[in-house]
Structure formats: structure tokens, C-alpha cells
Image: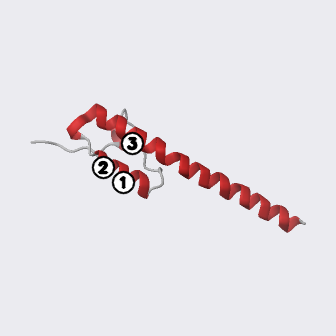
Amino acid sequence: MEKLGLYFCYLIFLLLYIDFCVASIPVCITNCVQCKQMFGVYFEGRACGDACISSNGQISPDCNNPGTLGIFLKRFH
């Protein structure tokens, strides 16, 4: 019976984790779109979206935090 409870807890944790990961991707993509609108041609929106998908939303840009934008910004000389 104790083993069944442990499996049940593991299943709940797994379902919550999957739900969190799936919910994080749209938020990340939305942040990419917002940054693209703010920075225009200086922001690499495609690279940002690809990073969102490959990291399951864990790499999410914050348009007000330069530390999260460095890899997506480009300079024109």
C-alpha cells in the first residue's frame, strides 16, 4: 500500500512538471514577440523562439533585463 502511494505521488509530480513545461513555452514565445516589437531589427526573434522550444521555455527573455537579451540582440555597424 505504501508503494502505491509513492507511485501516486510520483505520477502527480510528473503531471504537474509536464503541465509547467508546456505552459512555459507560450509565455516564452510571447516574451520573444514583445521583445521583437520593442527592439525591432536589433532583436533576433527567430533565435529567441527556437531557444524557447529547445529549452522547454526555461530560457525566457525579459525585455527589461539586458542579461537575458544578450544572445538575441545584434549590432549594426
Point out residue 13 in the picture as x, y percentages from the top left corner: 69, 56
Q: Residue furthest right?
A: 1
Residue type for callout 2: Arg
- Label 3 crowding class (10 Å Cα cut-off): few <14, some 14-19, many 20+? many
Alpha-carbon distance for marks 1 and 2? 6 Å
Q: Is residue 35 visible?
A: yes
Q: Is residue 71 visible?
A: no
Mark with earlier residue (2, 3): 2
Query: Which quadrant of the figure contains the C terminus?
Result: top left
Residue that mark 1 sits on: 50
1 or 3: mark nearer the eye: 1
Residue that mark 2 sits on: 46
Residue that mark 3 sits on: 61
- Label 1 crowding class (10 Å Cα cut-off): few <14, some 14-19, many 20+? few
Alpha-carbon distance for marks 2 and 3? 13 Å
Give the residue drawn at x 80%, y 63%. Answer: 6
Give the residue drawn at x 47%, y 50%. Answer: 57
Residue type for callout 3: Pro
Point out residue 51 in the picture as x, y percentages from the top left corner: 38, 53
2 or 3: mark nearer the eye: 2
The quadrant holding residue 32 is: top left
Q: Is residue 50 left or right of residue 15?
A: left
